[in-house]
Image: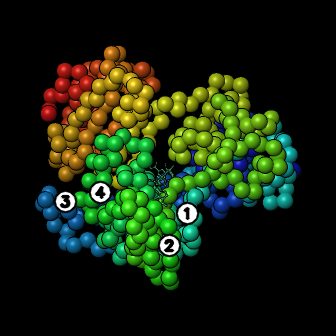
Amino acid sequence: MASYDVIVIGSGPGGYVAAIRCAQLGFKTACVEGRETLGGTCLNVGCIPSKALLHATHQLHEAEHNFEKMGLKVGAPKVDWKAMLAYKDDTIAQNTKGIEYLFKKNKIDWLKGWGAIPAPGKVTVGGETHEAKNIIVATGSEASGLPGVEIDETVVVTSTGALELSRIPKRMAVIGGGVIGLELGSVYARLGAQVTVVEYLDHITPGMDAEVQKGFQRLLKKQGLDFVMGAAVQSVEALKTKAKVHYKLRKDESEATLDADVVLVATGRKPFTDGVGLEALGVEMTERGQVKTDGHWRTNVDGVYAIGDCIAGPMLAHKAEDEGMACAEVIAGKAGHVNYSVIPSVIYTHPEVAAVGETEETLKEQGRAYKAGKFNFMGNGRAKANFAADGFVKILADKKTDRILGAHIIGPMAGDLIHEICVAMEFGASAEDLALTCHAHPTYSEAVREAALACGDGPIHA
Ligand code: NAI
């Protein structure tokens, strides 16, 4: 038995970042992880492996569609699926080992096994009980699945199975037009699969700016993805090597089916707290199964904190990381803080989609007077040179004060471009502040400045 200042349960982006910050703040820290490797869902079966496959298949797309236009003759590209999966696995290994190194460097003990809290101040792992003055629950989330749909991770898969299919399917049905469905759907569409997305709502990516939703769906259709919109999936009939998706169209209740070799169920995720013993401990939970926390990530049980996907808020790795750092600081008596109104979200398709802050719809709901400055990448020289001129930057600013309220980008490197606007928002900047900032030429970032100019006297290149 060992005694710690802080034990973090879970080593995903929330947990490992919390552990590192705790150690940096001088706490004797341990992190509990039951997987073979550190990093949680994000590094092992989520963000990182999906980005590896998105990167590889984007290169394939470039070779197939754009190389010749630039005078590059390399012949028809071939896909070695096993090698692509090995590249993905190597990417995972480099990242998970990186966290192991950071743990050693910060003298954080990795308690191997699944953790539970039998009583306040105590954590059991693999039959051993450890003492902890503070416990941070960072146990993450799992695929929520669908009633009537049995997951076998071979033919009917979640994102986990979709990252290691034994072969590239000819036909893939994707249930849910959210982030996971569209990222992984893009991967397989680029690899030649006929991908059909079946979405309950009349639009994709719920919560995104409506203009982005429409533009994004149009671009995905151009890339060969099919959509069945307004369709509620009722069940999936799985055979050995294929499956039939049964759905009902909401507009007229008519029923139809869709055959596929692989069905990806991407209908959302739910908090994962199984086996931690929170209920027996008396930790309050929300109706949605999230751990209830106050503004400082404290649960109702003294010394027990929670962060990341298992509490309320967007299920995003970077939101969990921010909470991890802030929670550690709160435990140290400092002013840990997360600004929830400036959390970017990114979809890593091609083009990428990124957003921060308010949408036009939320501003209308709030009855706020705003202006929208928009600039198409078609007017950006760098984007044209790189065959990446699809999409736009839209900045929303307060009509009176010009303060930036939100931004929405579809386009090349959107996931990186968004941060300039995040920083501006953190500093309470106006659109004019961005517009008056010199932006290097030729860069994609110029499109951000042009959108800021469009909030005032107008963009130059449109
Ligand atoms: P999601 O909530 O983004 O999308 C789920 C979609 O499924 C919704 O559009 C919903 O209307 C639809 N749906 C639900 N039930 C349905 C039914 N019976 N029939 C047809 N459609 C149905 O969930 P997703 O994509 O599974 O992602 C889960 C979480 O993981 C999200 O919170 C997301 O933010 C996070 N994530 C973030 C990524 C990123 O930041 N790039 C990448 C992957 C996941």
Choose between 154 and 420: the one closer to the eye: 154
Q: Amino acid at mark 1?
A: Leu
- Residue 78: where, in percent of width, then height? 29, 74
Of labels 2 and 3, the one closer to you: 2
Label 1 – label 4 distance at C-alpha: 25 Å
Q: Amino acid at mark 2?
A: Val
Left or right relative to 345: residue 350: left
Left or right relative to 302: residue 342: left
Of labels 3 and 4, the one closer to you: 4
Q: Amino acid at mark 4?
A: Leu
Q: Are marks 1 and 3 in contact (CB under 8 Å)?
A: no
Q: Residue sitting at 33 percent across and 24 percent down? A: 370
Mark 1 and ligand 1: say if the CB distance to the nearest ligand atom is below 8 Å.
yes
Q: Residues within 10 Å of mark 4 (few under 14, many from 20)?
A: some
Q: Is residue 124 above or below residue 406?
A: below
Pointer 2: what residue?
A: 236
Label 2 – label 4 distance at C-alpha: 25 Å
Q: Is residue 187 above or below residue 276?
A: below
Residue 49 in view, yes or no: no
Badge 2 or badge 4: first in the primary sequence: 4
Protein image colouring: rainbow
Pointer 4: what residue?
A: 220
Pointer 3: what residue?
A: 66
The numbered dot on residue 146 is 1
- Residue 224: where, in percent of width, then height? 27, 64
Q: Residue sitting at 56 percent across and 62 percent down? A: 145
Choose between 185 and 68: the one closer to the eye: 185
Label 3 – label 4 distance at C-alpha: 17 Å
Name which quarter of the figure residue 378 lies in: top left
Choose between 232 and 114: the one closer to the eye: 232
Left or right relative to 82: residue 149: right
Badge 3 or badge 4: first in the primary sequence: 3
